[in-house]
């Protein structure tokens, strides 16, 4: 049985029966909208704004480019995957993106913020929106793997999560947020 996003989510009149969508919102001056399924252009636009170090931290290794399979995976939106995109006022380029992949009552989250936009609270807003969506969908636990040298992400995630015991290896730690 597939677990879907909450019935409280708004349905677009042109959507199929299971295609639930969050409405675009403005939070602290940052526009947050759901990624449309298959929107590889937005995923590519954000990836191109990540420097080498940001890419290494987000993908746990060197990532000079995304393969077609990776691009398809990162732009996949369905009943178990949700993606939010952040925009700053007056800029058509995505400033950040957050992914959530559901597995029953748990989900893994990941986030990336364009290098030029880091330090503006975009990651914090994306995380808060994902937590709200996860709670509404009945998810009880969120997991995030964070590189040990990614101080901004560690600072953000340790405010709301605890390190899962014994899950610190290869310079990364798995953090868990009980909802």
Image (spheres, helix red, strand yellow):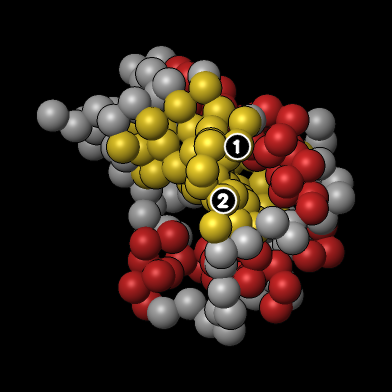
Report the front residue among 70 and 91.
70
Pinpoint residue 31: horizontal percent, then vertical percent: 70, 40
Q: Does residue 57 sit above or below 112 in this rendering?
A: below
Q: Earlier in the sequence, mark 1 or mark 2?
A: 1
Tell me which residue sits at (51%, 43%) in the image: 166
Specify the farthest residue to the left.
Answer: 1
Tell me which residue sits at (41%, 79%) in the image: 67
Report the front residue among 96 and 32.
96
Q: Are marks 1 and 2 in contact (CB under 8 Å)?
A: yes
Tell me if residue 10 can be seen: no
Q: Secondary structure at mark 2?
A: strand
Pinpoint residue 1: horizontal percent, then vertical percent: 13, 29
Q: Does residue 168 sit above or below 52 in this rendering?
A: above
Pinpoint residue 141: horizontal percent, then vertical percent: 45, 27
- Occupied quadrant, residue 156: top right
Q: Which residue is mark 2?
A: 168
Q: Does residue 114 sit above or below 13 in this rendering?
A: below
Q: Which mark is residue 163?
A: 1
Tell me if residue 106 can be seen: yes
Dot 1: within a 10 Å radius of its alpha carbon, few (fewer than 14), some, or many (20 or more) residues?
some
Alpha-carbon span between mark 1 and mark 2:
8 Å
Tell me which residue sits at (79%, 53%) in the image: 151
Specify the farthest residue to the bottom.
Answer: 64
Residue 92 left/right relative to 8: right
Residue 105 left/right relative to 120: left
Q: Which mark is residue 68?
A: none
């Amino acid at each position: 049985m597939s677990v879907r996003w909450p019935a409280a989510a708004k349905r677009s009149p042109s959507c199929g029966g299971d295609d639930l969508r969050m409405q675009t919102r403005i939070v602290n001056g940052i526009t947050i909208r759901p990624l449309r399924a298959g929107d590889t252009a937005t995923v590519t636009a954000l990836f191109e704004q990540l420097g080498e170090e940001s890419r290494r931290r987000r993908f746990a290794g060197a990532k000079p480019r995304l393969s077609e399979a990776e691009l398809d995976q990162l732009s996949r939106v369905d009943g178990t995957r949700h993606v939010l995109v952040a925009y700053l006022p007056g800029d058509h380029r995505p400033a950040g993106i957050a992914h959530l992949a559901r597995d029953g009552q748990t989900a893994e989250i990941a986030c990336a913020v364009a290098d030029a936009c880091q330090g503006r609270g975009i990651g914090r807003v994306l995380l808060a929106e994902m937590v709200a969506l996860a709670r509404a969908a009945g998810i009880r636990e969120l997991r995030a793997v964070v590189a040990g040298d990614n101080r901004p992400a560690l600072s953000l995630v340790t405010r709301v999560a605890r390190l899962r015991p014994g899950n610190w290896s290869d310079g990364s730690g798995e953090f868990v947020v009980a909802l």
